[in-house]
């Protein structure tokens, strides 16, 4: 009787293919399991990882001095880590008095934030465009003054203003709201210690500023465009390079 276990090459190929299929099937099942369990889309995955890393780090730190903690040490340690309190929503439950109060507050806040409607009585007039030129005083050099102490424009007109700097120093031109020269000037002086000042062209961040130029280098100029306020009055203009504004200022007279 021939007891040979040697199989034919075809059989061996079959077994090999069977093995390969089993291998691939295992991979597919593992992949499906990963996906079904949320895979890496699990919204808490990152957080859980962070927490794990934090725990490992603390536990590693605890091993400093080569004292290897026992399992019960670790368990005690893990339990000693304070868990974060669950977030409790402060929204009142519908149907309660607190809820009605809350709804009233929400409605009031919404009404306050609603955009105001334009006054329909104000019919749009044709835009008046005014071209102006303002120079820094270049002679004698470094005087830190504007050539003109005032400019006059009609309220609401659009101004195209050329700011020229024939001086040896850098200057800018900033228009402020009525009576805000000192306030903006103080902010300008404070920019001396602002590391971003140059990037901001030494123009402070303020609601009191109506329009501003960049910091204009000697012998350069810049054109700025802005709309003059509708309210007549004296609107100061200054150079906000720290220290300049006390000398380098003037008045934009806005008339009816
Ligand atoms: Cu200046």
Image (cartoon, rainbow, N blue to C red):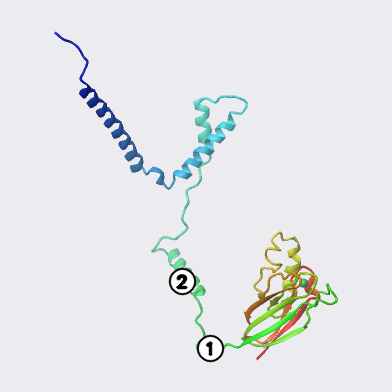
Task: Identify which residue is drawn at 46% across, 71% down.
Answer: 107
* 112 is higher (above) or lower (below) than 39: below
Q: Residues within 10 Å of mark 2 (few under 14, many from 20)?
A: few
Q: Quadrant of residue 61?
A: top right
- For marks 1 and 2, the one nearer the N-term is 2
Q: Is residue 25 left or right of residue 165?
A: left
Position of residue 132 measured from the top left corner of the image (x, y, whole percent)? 69, 84
Cα–Cα gap, marks 1 and 2: 33 Å
Position of residue 153 measured from the top left corner of the image (x, y, whole percent)? 68, 87
* 90 is higher (above) or lower (below) than 215: above
Task: Identify which residue is drawn at 47% across, 53% down.
Answer: 88
Task: Identify which residue is drawn at 73% across, 81% down.
Answer: 134
Quick one: 148 or 254, which is closer to the camera? 148
Mark 1: is the Cβ under 8 angstroms from ligand 1?
A: no
* 34 is higher (above) or lower (below) than 239: above
Q: Say if residue 16 shows up in the picture.
A: yes
**Element assignment for label 1:** loop
* 93 is higher (above) or lower (below) than 184: above
Residue that badge 1 annotates: 124
Q: Residues within 10 Å of mark 1 (few under 14, many from 20)?
A: few
Residue that badge 2 annotates: 107
Task: Identify which residue is drawn at 22% across, 15% down.
Answer: 6
Q: Looking at this rendering, what residue extends furthest in the top direction?
A: 1
Q: Say if residue 228 shows up in the picture.
A: no
* Mark toward the viewer: 1 or 2: 1
Q: Quadrant of residue 21?
A: top left
Position of residue 222 measured from the top left corner of the image (x, y, whole percent)? 68, 75
Q: Looking at this rendering, what residue extends furthest in the front direction?
A: 9
């Amino acid at each position: 009787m021939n007891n040979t276990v040697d199989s034919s090459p075809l059989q061996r190929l079959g077994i090999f293919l069977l093995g390969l299929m089993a291998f691939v099937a295992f991979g597919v099942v593992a992949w499906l399991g990963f996906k079904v369990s949320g895979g890496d889309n699990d919204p808490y995955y990152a957080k859980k990882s962070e927490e794990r890393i934090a725990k490992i780090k603390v536990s590693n730190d605890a091993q400093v001095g080569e004292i290897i903690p026992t399992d019960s040490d670790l368990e005690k340690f893990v339990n000693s880590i304070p868990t974060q309190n669950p977030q409790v929503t402060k929204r009142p439950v519908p149907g309660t008095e607190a809820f009605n109060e809350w709804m009233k507050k929400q409605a009031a806040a919404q009404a306050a934030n609603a955009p105001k409607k334009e006054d329909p009585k104000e019919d749009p007039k044709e835009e008046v465009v005014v071209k102006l030129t303002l120079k820094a005083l270049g002679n004698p050099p470094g005087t830190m003054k504007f050539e003109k102490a005032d400019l006059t424009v009609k309220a609401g007109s659009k101004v195209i203003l050329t700011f020229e700097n024939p001086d040896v120093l850098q200057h800018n031109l900033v228009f402020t709201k009525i009576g805000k020269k000192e306030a903006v000037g103080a902010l300008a002086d404070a920019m001396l210690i602002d590391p971003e000042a140059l990037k901001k062209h030494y123009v402070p961040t303020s609601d009191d500023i109506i329009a501003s130029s960049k910091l204009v280098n000697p012998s350069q100029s810049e054109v700025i465009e802005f709309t003059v306020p509708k309210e007549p009055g004296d609107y100061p203009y200054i150079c906000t390079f720290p220290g300049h504004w006390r000398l380098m200022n003037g008045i934009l007279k806005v008339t009816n």
